[in-house]
Image (cartoon, grey):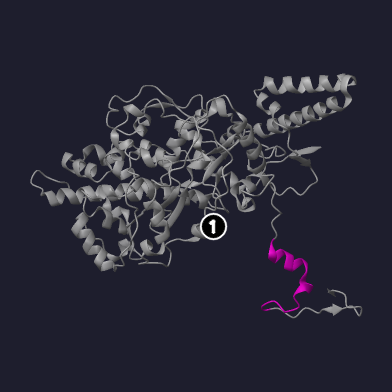
């Protein structure tokens, strides 16, 4: 009996598969069936938003957060976010779906949330004591937190930002600006950059919003995307049980592009003028005919996803003219291949891997690009006061050249589709196309079927190829081969897999008794377990134990117990 190969067959791109979350899903780990805890702390902002003073909203608009502040609170689907993280690849900064690579880009950030992307990077941190930060909070926010409310001289407990003293008609302009900064800090710490503490905000943001009129000069959009990339990279590896970052951006991106998971909108909001694209989802939604809140269902539907009917490459294409100008101001750098920077975080934006998201372009197999394992290891722990603008100087220069780094794309005229066949062949070799193992049969709950269907499709495709080869060799005497091939082709066409008929089958079905390590890479080895199996390799005593007796054969053989 043959077993489905989930991929990758070739490890040239996904070189960290054994550490990836999808490997544990394939192995059937029970712990991995729990959804990630999604961190956010923004309920106080959204519940009070409708009562904001118009004078405050004016300053929030000047600072560049007007579009975001005019949305509503959208509930997160933890299972949906978890299912997408299982498809996220730190090696490419893309989601690997069954048909190709897709990702969240600078275009999505600007259109959906209305945040500026073409501006100065959010970097540079000044070293300050708790007392100094307390004084700054008093000057800029109108509150004076005690030392217990400031963690590590760099983060503020967000409960300090709740229930501020209301403004009156006699409040000064300075009071109004303080209130505007306070609400912006709630957005930054609760919606855009929530960390795993789930109730802290970085005090260094105050340096960038001190002057509210110049706060809009910063590329808040690229910083948000960098932070989200880093959060997904970490959650996709190892045994993570929670995820932070602008998860509302991820969920909105899914609703816009993956029709399998898009809720039904009964009627669009009436006041969409001058609001970002995400505002269309701030209304009543119907989930009756789409999956919601069940991780196994999401996995199964993604495993069975088809490009033509389930994914929108360009959902904004026909509605760009209706969006406000601030949602299109950075259009000239939407396709820049540049580092995204947010203090200690540097993550690469790679639009050359998803050209079809920007227009009707041909997508050749992209060149391998190192997203930086070392970069992923850099965080702010134990590095208080580090001048990140100096440490990341070369990446800052790259960002300054973002217009020169815009990738070139070739239009797809529909006449020559060889590029698509080349891409599909490449992708079938390097991708992790299937998440769920068809041999697993849960005793209760949802029974996944997509991977079982994929297995049958690949076997049928393989038989079709073998019959075609037999027919070519047998010539006129190969009527039996012809009948087999015809039956396979009809079966594949009937279930919408006719494109596979045009592609030569890969040897991606392996014997069941082969080492099932989840695809391609060598199996993991536990060094501690190996030492326990072969204690003779190290005759030194374990800590607190006795020296093991070791006997060496006279013939000079290996030590034996």
Q: Which residue is label 1 attached to? A: 373
Front residue of 312 and 1: 312
> Element type at marker 1?
helix
Q: Is residue 132 magenta?
A: no
Residue at left offset 26%, top offset 47%? 216
Residue 111 position within the rendered picture, expressed as x and y whole percent measured from the top left: 37, 36
Query: Is residue 376 rendered to the left or right of residue 278?
Result: right
Figure quadrant of the C terminus: bottom right
Compared to residue 192, the image places residue 114 above or below, namely: above
Q: Residue 309 sits in which quadrant?
A: top right
Q: Residue 441 sits in which quadrant?
A: top right
Compared to residue 45, the image places residue 346 above or below, namely: below
Residue 203 position within the rendered picture, expressed as x and y whole percent measured from the top left: 30, 58
Query: Is residue 362 rendered to the left or right of residue 131?
Result: right
Q: How would you rate the neighbour count of disc 1 (Cα within 10 Å): few for under 14, some for 14-19, many for 20 or more?
A: few
Residue at the farthest left position = 170
Query: Is residue 131 rendered to the left or right of residue 477?
Result: left
Residue 70 position within the rendered picture, expressed as x and y whole percent measured from the top left: 28, 36
Q: Is residue 144 visible?
A: no
Which residues are drawn in magenta?
526-544
Figure quadrant of the N terminus: top right
Residue at left offset 36%, top offset 45%? 221
């Amino acid at each position: 009996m043959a077993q489905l190969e989930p991929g990758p067959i070739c490890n040239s791109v996904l070189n960290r598969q054994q550490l990836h979350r999808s490997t544990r899903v394939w192995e059937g780990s029970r712990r991995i069936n729990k959804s990630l805890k999604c961190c956010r702390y923004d309920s106080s902002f959204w519940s009070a938003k409708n009562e904001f003073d118009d004078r405050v909203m004016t300053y929030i608009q000047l600072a560049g957060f007007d579009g975001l502040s005019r949305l509503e609170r959208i509930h997160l689907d933890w299972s949906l976010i978890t299912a997408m993280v299982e498809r996220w690849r730190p090696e490419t900064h893309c989601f690997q779906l069954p048909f190709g690579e897709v990702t969240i880009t600078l275009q999505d950030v600007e259109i959906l949330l209305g945040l500026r992307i073409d501006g100065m990077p959010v970097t540079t941190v000044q070293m300050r004591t708790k007392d100094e930060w307390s004084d700054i909070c008093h000057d800029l926010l109108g509150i004076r937190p005690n030392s217990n409310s400031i963690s590590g001289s760099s983060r503020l407990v967000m409960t300090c930002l709740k229930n501020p003293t209301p403004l009156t008609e006699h409040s000064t302009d300075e009071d109004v600006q303080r209130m505007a900064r306070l609400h912006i800090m709630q957005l930054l710490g609760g919606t855009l950059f929530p960390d795993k503490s789930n109730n802290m905000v970085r005090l260094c943001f105050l340096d960038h919003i001190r002057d509210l009129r110049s706060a809009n000069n910063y590329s808040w959009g690229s910083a948000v995307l960098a932070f989200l990339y880093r959060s997904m990279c970490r959650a996709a590896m190892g045994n993570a049980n929670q995820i932070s970052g602008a998860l509302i951006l991820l969920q909105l991106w899914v609703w816009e592009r993956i029709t399998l998971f898009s809720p039904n909108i009964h009627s669009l909001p009436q006041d969409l003028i001058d609001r970002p694209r995400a505002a269309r989802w701030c209304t009543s939604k119907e989930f009756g005919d789409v999956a919601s809140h069940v991780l196994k269902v999401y996995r199964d539907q993604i495993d069975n996803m088809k490009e033509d009917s389930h994914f929108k490459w360009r959902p904004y294409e026909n509605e760009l003219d209706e969006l406000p100008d601030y949602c299109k101001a950075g259009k000239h750098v939407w396709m820049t291949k540049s580092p995204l920077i947010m203090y200690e975080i540097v993550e690469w934006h790679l639009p050359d891997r998803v050209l079809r998201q920007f227009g009707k372009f041909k997508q050749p197999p992209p060149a391998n690009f190192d997203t930086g394992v070392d970069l992923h290891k850099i965080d702010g722990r134990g590095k208080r006061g580090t001048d990140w603008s100096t440490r990341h100087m070369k990446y800052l220069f790259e960002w300054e050249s973002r217009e020169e780094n815009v990738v070139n794309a070739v239009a797809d005229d529909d006449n020559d589709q060889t590029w698509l066949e080349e891409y599909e062949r490449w992708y079938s070799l390097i991708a992790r196309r299937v998440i769920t193992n068809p041999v697993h049969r849960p005793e209760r709950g949802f029974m996944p079927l997509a991977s079982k269907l994929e297995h049958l499709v690949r076997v049928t495709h393989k038989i079709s190829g073998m019959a075609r080869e037999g027919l070519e060799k047998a010539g006129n005497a190969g009527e039996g081969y012809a009948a087999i091939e015809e039956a396979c082709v009809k079966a594949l066409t009937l279930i919408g897999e006719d494109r596979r008929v045009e592609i030569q089958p890969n040897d991606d079905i392996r014997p069941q008794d082969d080492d099932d390590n989840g695809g391609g890479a060598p199996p993991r080895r536990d060094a501690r377990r190996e030492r326990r199996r072969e204690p003779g390799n190290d005759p030194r005593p374990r800590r607190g134990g006795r020296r093991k007796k070791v006997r060496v054969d006279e013939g000079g053989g290996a030590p034996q117990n």
